[in-house]
Amino acid sequence: MEFDKDEYVKRVESLRPSPPLTHDLELSSTDQARVDNAIASVRAEGFAIIPGFLGEGRLEDVQKGLEPIFEMTTERDADKGGRYSGIQTVHVHNLFAKTDAVDNIATDPVLLHVIEGVLGKQFQLSVGTAMCPDPGCAPQGLHQDDGHYPLPRPRPPFIANTLIALDDFTEANGATRLVPGSHLSTDPVDPEARVVFAEMTAGSLLVFDGALWHAGGGNRTTDQRRRSINLNFNLSWLRQQENQYVGIPRARWLEMPERLQRLLGFQKVNFLYGSVDYTDPLEYFLENP
Ligand SMILES: O=C(O)CCC(=O)C(=O)O
């Protein structure tokens, strides 16, 4: 690449903060009330459920669109190593490289406004996963999703995690177990702590603070899968769980709408972080094949 000094100075002078991901996304008064209630509940209890987040048509479309993805899930015997114990269902990661069925859900206005309310204006998608504890899957152990960032607590929320139910979540088929209020605790939770089950109908959204102690429930049924889309968001100045710049092929990036490209990581934050040569990373990526 040729080096042009004047061009370089022009770029420095044109640096501006990126608009937030919710830019131009208006909410109806009903949706605004749903968002406000969800944010208040995440702050107080650590989690919230928004029933009917996906209407019937969108739910059917995504159930169908994700059929090939859920065929990829498999199981492993966790007693042989790794996390938890018993039979565990292996999730399908790097979701946006494998399908576009979730694109319009990831940038849904209600979802983005809720995440902004929990994390503030600078956030990104850390990892997208299809999760599906199958019949016979053992319960996970209680854990926090933000435990991989080794900083002392208390601290502001680093992660807002979501599960979008594609089947009804019931205690029997493995609804997520949550310890209400545990996101405010600086000590590890008592393994016998009182849990609530995130029972909800298909199409509902569960959102929780990454500091909340929680676990996938065991699936005691013999015939019910518990499918969900897991969209995990973090502060955009932290490292993402999944390296999506490497994991998502260039051709797939190019077909995405800009808001989704930015959500998945092409953002400049805190003045210069994430930029390339004083240039917005998305502009740079598009101009340099
Ligand atoms: O599937 C769930 O309910 C939660 C899964 C989870 O917390 C995890 O896999 O870390």
Image (cartoon, helix red, strand yellow):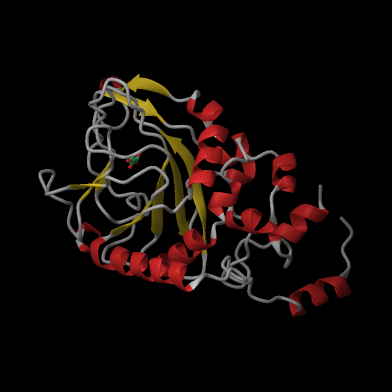
User: Image quarter for residue 50?
Assistant: bottom left
Q: Which quadrant: the N terminus?
A: bottom right
Query: Looking at the image, is 41 positioned above or below residue 247?
Result: below
Q: Relative to residue 147, is residue 59 drawn left or right?
A: right
Q: Nearer the viewer, residue 177 or 16?
A: 177
The x and y percentages for residue 36 are 38, 71
Q: Can residue 187 be seen?
A: yes
Q: Nearer the viewer, residue 197 or 127?
A: 197
| Residue at 52% across, 67% down | 122
| Residue at 59% across, 50% down | 104
Ligand 1 - quadrant of the structure image: top left
| Residue at 47% across, 50% down | 54
The x and y percentages for residue 265 are 59, 55
The x and y percentages for residue 107 are 57, 56
| Residue at 36% across, 67% down | 39
Q: Relative to residue 220, is residue 134 drawn left or right?
A: right
Query: Looking at the image, is 247 positioned above or below residue 257?
Result: above
Which residue occupies the extreme bottom position in the image? Answer: 13
The x and y percentages for residue 189 are 16, 51
Which residue occupies the extreme front position in the image? Answer: 56
